[in-house]
Image (cartoon, grey):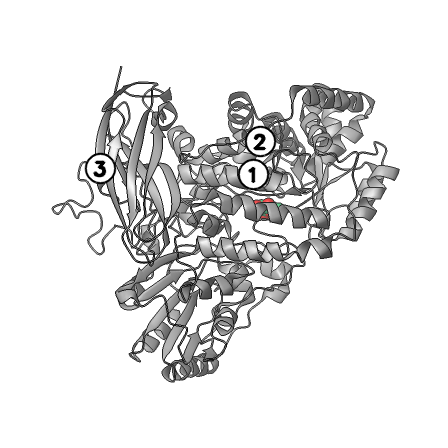
């Protein structure tokens, strides 16, 4: 199996029927106020104005509570909801557990770089286990927005630019979080977010409006969401921004027509934080009452923290504007999820569980393994890597080299204290007999603080004076000068990617490139390790630094994983899930664009920009290994197939080196003509294989209706054309091993 598939095990129809009956019995007993309470998600944190959570739970109960991470408090609040609220319905406790609860895994963009869905399955299963032991029932993940603009900060939370890889990683994360069945007591309910199009924010500016044609949405941005539905995801979260002039959180087309009517989604939709209230701010609703009405009618089940539902829905029903049937329709899936997950039977968490669960050795082991598989080797001139463990004196230089926060990356749960093995520590652990010196160089920080800095002041990085910057720079160069080899660890702080963390440039922030140049000028061997949450335009490094490892934000065991790779205990095999533009001004950039009348790459046609090449610095799917591989024998089972039928593509990959290693075999197609213009290349299959020296393997892919169908602008529907197709199999999106076939009537 190489084309990805979803494995869904939905509840049996008997269980479904029993739960539906139970929910109907409950609903019949509930007052309007109790029902409205189930449609509200209340804040457990005091940074949001609003009524006191405990009082709300006592008075009406609530569908859910978020922004609290306190096991004991969960039980206290749950007891109030059950014993004191009129309905006695337990609360769902929700929090963003994006890439780990206590044990932190590589950020989702890094997980996608593994091109191994099992990395996501296993990592998110542990994240779920730890979160559930803490008392959390529901995570706001996976974030599965396709992102083709590296300036957009939230690119770090997703799986990159490609709908096929994105769908595979979306389904894998859902399986990891939820397991086989939502009733699994060691799992959490997942939430596919942000529906939909958020990653295409204009100019890469977070929250800005999005303009996407239906064709672009259906072919590129929606597939991961559909894959999440097919994988059985329990909930969805709507996006904040305007999509084609309608806030996604009030889009009937998205929430009802596509999600429920077409895809058959049976779970519930929560708004993004305050998004129902924001309908007023965004100039869509007249006031909170109007916002509540618009969101509910559009198909939004739960209002996250805006209190717009709580304050207005009962009135809207009482004055006849909204029907009780609509309220019941919106409450039903919320109660259904609660029943399916066994919350009525087991509403409390065992307070003694968490410490034991988070200290299980396999959690750290899995995190290290996931980080190893996620890293991408971008350059390795003259086989500088792997390094010898006989080195006597190594200097580790750079502002993120010893930063636990940068190693873990963005999106930690509330109250989390960074505790990662940094790259410096990882190298010290590996080279226990050698001298390892360290200097951070000048610190890096955002020019404009994020609003998160106000909420979590401990994350603030103090500003250095010009004299301090100069001193730090000089010290770093001096430290490097004495060493035999220098490992530069550069990139971004945790707050430089993520929500409200977009940037206009993709350059290394601060003085990092200057420092890199000064250190390289010493004439010693230099290895560059990147810790960052988005592609960076490392043009100078790509030509002047012999070895570059993209480690992303690798999590708790990140430093160990980096050292494992640098010293050859592990052979890197990750591949880029996004292309690296040469310049932030080139974004959005992605491999799957259509041809123009002057195809890029043709020697005569350089008319795109006159001041720089517009090809990516590193293409989608790219990544090196200490081994080398050769592709051959690309064979198609048929030269022609009838529309609706499939063919098999096989190709051989051989490890031609003397070391074992992993290669990701990638299959791309291009439809040569048809009802619409089709992308120059589209990923339609991949498989990460491990090969011993000299070993070869034949990899097999199926191409059929599913892979060859697309949403057509001209036809206004899903179609499969009769046309000729190119096929390529190889190690990245520029693969050259080629064959052709034709689909006939
Ligand atoms: C983010 C969501 C997140 C929510 C709850 C919002 O600001 O956009 O991704 O799940 O907050 O914390």
Describe residue 71's horizontal placement relative to residue 612 as left or right: right
What numbered label is drawn on residue 411? none
Q: What SS does tag 1 mark? A: helix
Q: Which of label 3 and label 1 is nearer to you? A: 3
- Residue, disc 1: 174
Residue drawn at the location 63% of the way across and 53% of the way down? 101
What numbered label is drawn on residue 232? 2
Is residue 353 at least partly visible in the picture? yes
Q: Nearest the camera: 632 or 326?
A: 632
Determine contact: label 2, label 1, CB under 8 Å: yes
- Residue, disc 3: 738
Q: Position of residue 323 (x, y in %)?
A: 70, 20
Q: Quadrant of the C terminus?
A: top left
Describe residue 730's horizontal placement relative to residue 530 as left or right: left
Q: What SS does tag 2 mark? A: loop
Q: Nearest the camera: 285 or 738?
A: 738
């Amino acid at each position: 199996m190489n084309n990805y598939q979803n494995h869904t095990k939905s509840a049996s129809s008997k269980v479904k029927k029993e739960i539906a009956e139970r929910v109907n019995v409950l609903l019949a007993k509930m007052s309007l106020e109790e029902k409205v309470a189930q449609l509200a998600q209340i804040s457990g944190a005091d940074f949001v104005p609003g009524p006191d959570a405990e009082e709300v739970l006592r008075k009406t109960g609530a569908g859910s509570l978020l922004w609290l991470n306190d096991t004991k408090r969960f039980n206290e609040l749950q007891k109030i909801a059950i014993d004191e609220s009129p309905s006695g319905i337990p609360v769902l406790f929700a929090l963003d557990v994006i890439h780990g609860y206590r044990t932190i895994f590589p950020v989702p963009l890094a997980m996608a770089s593994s091109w191994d869905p099992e990395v996501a399955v296993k990592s998110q299963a542990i994240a779920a286990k730890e979160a559930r032991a803490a008392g959390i029932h529901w995570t706001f993940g996976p974030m599965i927005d396709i992102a083709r603009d590296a300036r957009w900060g939230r690119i770090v939370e997703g799986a990159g630019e490609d709908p096929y890889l994105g769908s595979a990683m979306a389904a894998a994360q859902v399986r990891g979080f939820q397991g086989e069945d939502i009733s699994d007591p060691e799992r959490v309910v997942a939430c596919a977010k942000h529906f939909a199009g958020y990653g295409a924010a204009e100019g890469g500016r977070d929250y800005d409006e999005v303009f996407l044609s239906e064709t672009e949405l259906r072919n590129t941005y929606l597939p991961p969401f559909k894959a999440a539905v097919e994988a059985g995801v329990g909930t969805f979260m709507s996006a904040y921004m305007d999509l084609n002039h309608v806030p996604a959180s009030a889009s009937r087309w998205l929430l009802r027509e596509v999600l429920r009517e077409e895809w058959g989604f049976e779970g519930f939709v929560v708004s993004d934080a305050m998004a129902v209230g924001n309908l007023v701010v965004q100039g869509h609703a007249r006031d909170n009452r109007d916002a509540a009405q618009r969101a509910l009618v559009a198909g939004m089940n739960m209002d996250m923290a805006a209190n717009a539902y709580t304050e207005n829905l009962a009135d809207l029903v009482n004055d006849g504007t909204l029907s009780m049937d609509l309220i019941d329709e919106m409450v039903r899936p919320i109660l259904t999820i609660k029943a399916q997950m066994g919350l009525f039977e087991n509403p409390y968490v065992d307070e003694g569980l968490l410490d034991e669960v988070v200290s299980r050795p396999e959690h750290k082991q899995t995190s290290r393994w996931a980080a190893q598989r996620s890293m991408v080797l971008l350059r390795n001139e003259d086989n500088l890597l792997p390094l010898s463990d006989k080195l006597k004196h190594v200097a580790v230089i750079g502002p993120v080299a010893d930063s636990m926060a940068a190693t873990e990356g963005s999106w930690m749960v509330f109250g989390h204290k960074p505790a990662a093995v940094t790259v410096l520590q990882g190298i010290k652990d590996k080279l226990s007999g050698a001298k390892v010196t360290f200097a951070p160089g000048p610190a890096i920080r955002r020019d404009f603080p994020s609003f998160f800095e106000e909420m979590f002041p401990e994350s603030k990085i103090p500003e250095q004076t010009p004299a301090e910057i100069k001193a730090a720079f000089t010290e770093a160069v001096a430290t490097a000068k004495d060493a035999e080899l220098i490992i530069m660890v550069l990139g971004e702080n945790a707050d430089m990617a993520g929500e409200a963390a977009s940037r206009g440039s993709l350059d290394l922030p601060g003085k990092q490139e200057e420092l890199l140049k000064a250190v390289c000028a010493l004439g010693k061997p230099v290895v560059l390790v990147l810790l960052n949450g988005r592609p960076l335009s490392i043009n100078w490094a790509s030509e002047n630094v012999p070895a570059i490892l993209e480690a992303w934000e690798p999590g708790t065991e990140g430093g160990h994983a980096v050292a494992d790779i640098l010293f050859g205990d592990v052979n890197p095999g990750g591949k880029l899930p996004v292309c690296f533009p040469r310049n932030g001004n080139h974004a959005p950039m992605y491999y799957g664009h259509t041809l123009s009348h002057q195809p890029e790459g043709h020697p005569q046609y350089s008319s795109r920009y006159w001041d720089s090449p517009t090809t990516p610095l590193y293409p989608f799917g790219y990544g090196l290994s200490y081994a080398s591989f050769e592709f051959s024998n690309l064979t198609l089972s048929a030269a022609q197939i009838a529309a609706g039928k499939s063919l098999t593509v096989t190709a051989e990959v051989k490890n031609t080196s003397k070391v074992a290693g992993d290669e990701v075999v990638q299959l791309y197609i291009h439809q040569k003509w048809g009802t619409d213009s089709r992308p120059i290349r589209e990923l339609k299959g991949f498989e990460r294989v491990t090969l011993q020296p000299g070993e070869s393997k034949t990899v097999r892919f199926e191409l059929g209706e599913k892979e060859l169908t697309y949403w057509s602008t001209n036809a206004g529907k899903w179609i499969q054309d009769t046309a000729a197709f190119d096929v390529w199999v190889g190690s990245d999106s520029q693969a050259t091993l080629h064959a052709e076939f034709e689909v006939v009537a």
